[in-house]
Image: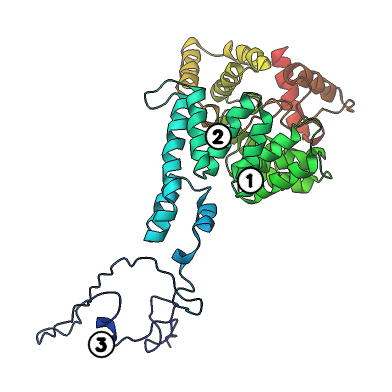
Amino acid sequence: MKQRTYPSGSSLSRLSSLHIPKVSASEVSSSEYGAVRTPVKSASSSVRPIRFCSRSWPARVSEPSGSSSHAADFSALPYDILVKIAASFNLPNVQAASLVCRSWSEALRPLREAMLLLKWGKRFKHGRGGVRPNREKALDSFMKAVAHGSTLAMVDAGLIYWEMGEKSKAISLYQKAAELGDPAGQCNLGISYLQADPPNSKDAIKWLYKASIGGNVRAQYQLALCLHRGHGIKSNMEEAAKWYLEAAEGGFVRAMYNISLCYSFGEGLMHSHKLARKWMKRAADHGHSKAQFEHGLALFSEGDMMKAVVYLELATRAGEEAAAHVKNVILQRLSAASRDHVMCLADSLPRPLWLVQTTPYISLDANINQKDSINYKPPSSLSSARGAMFIQFCNYCFHGALPRVEHLSTHEKKKCVDLKKVIF
């Protein structure tokens, strides 16, 4: 027996959950929607012709307060409310919203103009579109866009003021953008409170949390750091790991590295070597130098020399000095043709996007690969001589920052010891 999954056609349409009343021909002809073409019956066909309706765009008129015809009409919203709703829209969203009705188009005209000013501001700031970088002209364009109500311009202008050392003006613009609901403005405001002297941790956490809920991955990462270190909020490793993972899944590279370490130790998350390797490789592929170093060593310990050299070479170019020593040892084992091949592979890899992005965020107060990431220390005492050798190896290659010892199996420890023997 077939079961009906939609209401009967007598009362509702199959394609809509809204009630569609029947309208007589006389009512349609006298409606404000214009004339409707009357269908012509054909004796040779039983198919009902389609009705074509052309609606004229009615002017926005005021109605008595008792009228309910526009009770659910968004075009009746006040202009200032519309502008606040759309203040954080980008150009495609503003253009789409402008097509809703004439009222919205008129209300959003200042924001459309602001988008053009914002575009020129970015050109002057980054030297795009055939213009030379000019910070003064960029700031002027951003401030004109701010006057038109764009929160995106508020964040960009605030960043320039921050770089110029005028932090009070920057915070004022961030505050305005944050209150209008812009996640980037909320994130920058939270970070600026953390960097204040003295820090305003309470307000910083409040705005970082709002930005994190809004999906801002940078805020999610910074909030995770605060929860991890207990900075301005009670330390909570489970909550920190949750936000690390959220930011990592959103594409934030530093969070990828940190969530890999969380999985390695089972801190805040269940220990998983497989997931730790997955996120370490992903961070390495996105250009995190310490992740490239560690992933290269992992590949070397598994015997994959060619890939190991590629990652170690990338880490060396990014400033990991210890990676150069390990790479040179491996290169001595390879033939001249293999050495040339791996160097060509390293040269052919594209530059990570996060190194060339121009997202309008203030920089964090710590280095990407050291202070701003989780920094573990290996334990000072182990029962076996091999463990002691492994610690010596870690101290030499990783400056005491590789947290592997107490969680390694005997087989993994042996691999590390063998690796140390090769190097030394």
User: Amino acid type of disc 2?
Assistant: Asp
For residue 325, above or below residue 291: above
> Secondary structure under badge 1?
helix
The Cα–Cα distance between marks 3 and 2, rounded to whole angstroms, is 57 Å
The residue at which mark 3 appears reads as 26
First-in-chain label (1 vs 3): 3
> Secondary structure under badge 3?
helix
Q: Where is residue 34 in the image (x, y as percent from the top left)?
A: 25, 75
420 relative to 246 in the view: left or right:
right
The residue at which mark 2 appears reads as 156
Res 97 visible: no
User: Label 3: few (<14), some or many (≥20) within 10 Å?
Assistant: few
The Cα–Cα distance between marks 1 and 3, rounded to whole angstroms, is 53 Å
User: Amino acid type of disc 1?
Assistant: Ala
Residue in the picture at 60% in, 38% down: 252
First-in-chain label (2 vs 1): 2
- The image quadrant of residue 128 is top left
Could you tell me which quadrant the C terminus lies in?
Answer: top right
Res 46 visible: yes
User: Amino acid type of disc 3?
Assistant: Ser
The residue at which mark 1 appears reads as 178
- The image quadrant of residue 281 is top right
411 relative to 343 in the view: left or right:
right
Residue in the picture at 43% in, 88% down: 1
Q: Looking at this view, is 373 or 331 the one in front?
A: 373
The Cα–Cα distance between marks 2 and 1, rounded to whole angstroms, is 13 Å
User: Label 2: few (<14), some or many (≥20) within 10 Å?
Assistant: many
For residue 197, above or below residue 267: above
- The image quadrant of residue 312 is top right
Q: Position of residue 5 (x, y in %)?
A: 45, 81
